[in-house]
Amino acid sequence: MVLTLPLSALRPNDILLMLALGGGYEILTCVTQMRTRAPSRNERTLRSELHRLRFETVKKRSLGPSAFVETAKLERQILANEKELASHDSGRSERLGRIRSVLKKVSTVVQVTIFLVYFGIPLLSIDGTRIPAVHTPGGDIVMAEDAANACLRGICFPFCVWLKLSAVGLAERASSVGALVVFWSAQVTIRMVLECVEVLWVR
């Protein structure tokens, strides 16, 4: 059995554009942050050296007082490496904070632009008149507008406040999908995929 949506408006080209824009922007955002969080070659070398020095220090300590000078020298090297690594971590956190601040501003500009360009233009709208009449337990007939609203709620579950905000300016707010919803859906999907990729890559 094939189910068809009772659509009164559908703009596939604009939907594809929003999906591409949202997905592309999220890829750029996530990749930029991933590259910033990733340790540099110098940091990886320092961490490897730090592990080696700690291992050597444990071996020297096991030799007792006779290896005190060598142990103290290794401990000073460990402290120097830890200080340098802490400096790298601090610098990376600062860079990441600046990048996130810029990306947040850019994201706001992009979303406001999309909202203004597509103000009052639904990318998808449900036609309640094409939904079979439904009777409530009290015998009342569900109105076409309520039927359309219920249909969209079933598709876009959960029906959160962001969906309502994105539909500001649309003639049929409760039964229409605005451009920002499509843009956000692409962002969320790509973000979840890239988070999984990052976890596997780090491992």
Image (tube, rainbow, N blue to C red):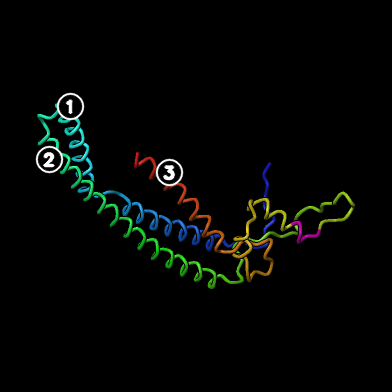
The quadrant where residue 23 appears: bottom left
The quadrant where residue 101 appears: bottom left
Of helix, strand and loop, which one carries label 2? helix
Magenta span: 143-147
Category of crowding for the residue at label 1, using alpha-carbon neighbours closer than 10 angstroms: few (below 14), some (14–19), many (at least 20) = few
Q: Residue at x 46, y 70 (%)?
A: 109
Q: Is residue 86 above or below residue 94?
A: above
Identity, as a three-letter code, of the amino acid under mark 2: Lys
Of helix, strand and loop, which one carries label 3? helix
Q: Nearer the viewer, residue 129 or 76?
A: 76
The x, y position of residue 166, in whole percent, is: 59, 65
Let me know if residue 43 is in the magenta part. no
* Disc ID at residue 73: 2
Q: Nearer the viewer, residue 184 or 122?
A: 184
Q: Quadrant of the C terminus?
A: top left
Q: Nearer the viewer, mark 1 or mark 3?
A: 1
Category of crowding for the residue at label 3, using alpha-carbon neighbours closer than 10 angstroms: few (below 14), some (14–19), many (at least 20) = few
Residue situated furthest front in the rendering = 65
Q: Quadrant of the N terminus?
A: top right
Residue located beneath label 3 in the image: 196
**How far separated are the C-alphas under marks 1 and 3?**
43 Å
